[in-house]
Amino acid sequence: MKKLIFIVFITFSNLIFSQVSEKILNDNFLNLLESDQACYLINFEDLNTNEIKEICILDNAFISAFEIENNIIHDETKCCDYLERYFYATNLIKKNGSRNFKFKNPKSLEILNENYISYDELNEFNKRLTINLIIQNFKKGENLSINIADDDYKYINYYGYLLSKEGFQINYFLFNCFGPNNLFCSNCQKK
């Protein structure tokens, strides 16, 4: 029954914002695991409440939540360095072969839930910006990046979510001190 509810949720959420299949979304997620500074579009089930959410999350935040959930040691005196943990976690995620995950640890869930955007918020954001123009430019291979002057990571999540649902693989540069944050399409072809 849980599996049926999960499948219905995924199908419904894809109908609202997505123009591409679940296979493309899943393949894009797996491809982004090979790159640095990526925006992941994932589904996760909270095993404490059985609630399922789809989120866009920056790679380092997702890897942290995954490491906590899977008890990958964060104390470098007892384990490996950051990169070793990162690659170990990434390999475990690849073995999952899917963008669908289950989490129970409250610390992991806190990280994931910080990245949740409701459909109402997404609709409001979509109305205020010309996301369709950005999508058309990406499809044409023009203007393959977006400057985000605001330091609010929610904007990265908004853009990342909406563009990922269209089948684009989204990466980011966070410049903090040196200028605006920047999102770019890593699977678009410049013309």
Image (tube, grey):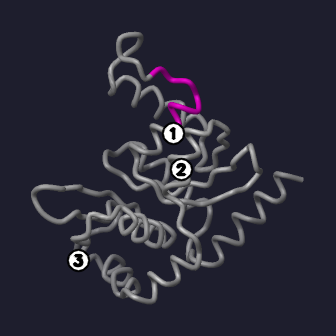
Residue at x 76% of width, y 60% of height: 7
Q: If the image is split into quadrants, where does the C terminus sit?
A: bottom left
Q: Position of residue 165 (x, y in %)?
A: 51, 69
Residue under circle 3? 143
Mark nearer the N terminus (2 vs 3)? 2
- Identity, as a three-letter code, of the amino acid under mark 3: Asn
Q: Residues within 10 Å of mark 2 (few under 14, many from 20)?
A: many
Q: Position of residue 151 (x, y in %)?
A: 26, 63
**Left or right of 87, for residue 124:** right
Q: Secondary structure at mark 1?
A: helix
Which of the two marks, 2 or 3, is nearer to us in this view?
2
Q: Quadrant of residue 170?
A: bottom left
- Identity, as a three-letter code, of the amino acid under mark 1: Ala
Q: Which residues are magenta?
A: 66-73
Tag 2–tag 1 contact (CB < 8 Å): yes
Residue under circle 2? 112
Real-space Cα separation, disc 2 to disc 3, in angstroms: 30 Å
Residue at x 41% of width, y 13% of height: 79
**Left or right of 144, for residue 57:** right
**Left or right of 162, for residue 17:** right
Residue under circle 1? 65
Q: Is residue 103 magenta?
A: no
Q: Residues within 10 Å of mark 3 (few under 14, many from 20)?
A: some
Q: How many numbered markers are drawn?
A: 3
Q: Quadrant of residue 104?
A: top right
